[in-house]
Structures are given as C-alpha cells and as structure tokens.
Amino acid sequence: MIRNAIGSLMGLIGAAAAVWSPFRAWYDGRHGRDYRLTDLFSGSGIDPTGKSGVMASILLAFLFAALLTLAAVFLRSRVLMAVAGIVVIGITVLWMVRQGQAVGSLSVGGDGTGLGEGVANAFGGGALLILAAAVMRGRGRRRTRTPAPYEPLDLPPVTPTNAAWPPPADHT
C-alpha cells in the first residue's frame, strides 16, 4: 500500500512537471506551447517562427499523459503509468529531432539560447512517471479459494453381510 501511495505521488508530480513544461522556454526562449503537435508528425517539420494555439500545441499530448496518469493512480496500474511516461519522453525526443532538423543542430547555452528548462521539465516529468511505474506495486492479485483436497470417508467395506442394497429376497 505504501509503495502504491509513493508511486502515485511520484506520478502526479511527474505529470504536473510535464504539463507545466510547455509554459516554459524550450528553445531560444520560445515556449513549448508555440510548437504545434502536428508539426512533429508532418513532413515539413517545425516552423521556426510559427505560433500555435495552446490546445493545438505539445501541451495536448502532455494533457493526455496526465489523464493516463490519473487513470493509473485510480486503477493502481503500473502499465498506464509507464505508458504516460513513454508518451511524455517520446513527444519530447520527437520534438528534439524535429527541432534539430529545423535549425541544423541543438545547443545548450547558459544565456537563454539553446535548449531551455521546458525540455528539462518534460524529460524529468517523463522519467519520474516511469520511475513511479517501477515503484508502484500495482493492483493485488485476487486469490481464489481452492477447495480442500478430496479425502475418502473411513467407512467399513461393503460385504454381503452388511450391504443394505439390494435388499434380501423374501422367500415366503
């Protein structure tokens, strides 16, 4: 029970970090909510100057992962918690690949250029979700009650002298 509670708390913190990450800077001061989710899966890639609506951005995938996390907490499901973590890390890695294709390379700078804290929040949240799945014990298995093994009764053997059936023939 304690492992499920700790894993659930870790999962909720990870989901909160993932949902919060699009509101932080992801690359060169551009927030994650400015990247369209469909740009990650299109052939044209990320538009370096484009804007996106909040619900059409990367936030949509992270909200889906947060819903998976809530379902995992209520159902005590390790699998759903791990899937939520994989969704967050997968979208973040896919964004990094597409961003690297759009600008030629990725960089990390201390002056606000390059990868920002939003990417770190997304990776940290996804890692925390996967760690929470590992910590959780999951739902307990229901044990079915098996009947006791059959034990024959200790009855005297049936012999013609004490047999009740067939009844003796009446010869009168």
Image (tube, rainbow, N blue to C red):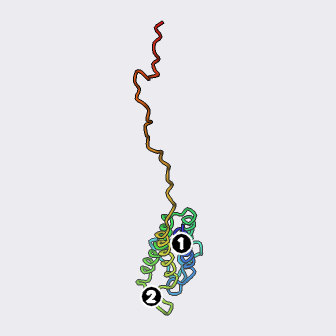
Badge 2 is on which residue?
108
Badge 1 is on which residue?
6
When the figure is inspected, residue 159 is found, relative to residue 32, above or below; the finding is: above
Furthest-bottom residue in this view: 111
Say which quadrant the N terminus sits in.
Answer: bottom right
> In terms of depth relative to the viewer, which is nearer, 13 or 117?
13
Q: Percent position (x, y) of residue 81? A: 50, 67
Q: Earlier in the sequence, mark 1 or mark 2?
A: 1
Cα–Cα span, label 1 and label 2: 33 Å
Secondary structure beneath dot 1 equals helix
Amino acid type of the residue that numbered disc 2 sits on in the rendered structure:
Val
When the figure is inspected, residue 73 is found, relative to residue 159, above or below; the finding is: below
> In terms of depth relative to the viewer, which is nearer, 12 or 111?
12
Q: Is residue 121 left or right of residue 161?
A: right
Q: Residue at x 55, y 77 (%)?
A: 17
Say how many tags the image has.
Answer: 2
Q: Percent position (x, y) of residue 66? A: 56, 70
Furthest-front residue in this view: 161
Give neighbour class at mark 1: few <14, some 14-19, many 20+ (Cα, 10 Å).
Answer: some
- Report the mark closest to the observer, 1 or 2: 1
Q: Percent position (x, y) of residue 11? A: 53, 72
Q: Residue at x 49, y 82 (%)?
A: 120
Is residue 87 visible in the rendered image? The answer is no
Q: Percent position (x, y) of residue 34? A: 55, 79
Secondary structure beneath dot 2 equals loop
When the figure is inspected, residue 34 is found, relative to residue 4, above or below; the finding is: below
Q: Which mark is residue 80?
A: none
Give neighbour class at mark 2: few <14, some 14-19, many 20+ (Cα, 10 Å).
Answer: few
When the figure is inspected, residue 84 is found, relative to residue 158, above or below; the finding is: below
Q: Is residue 60 left or right of residue 98?
A: right
Instruction: Name the quadrant containing residue 13.
Output: bottom right
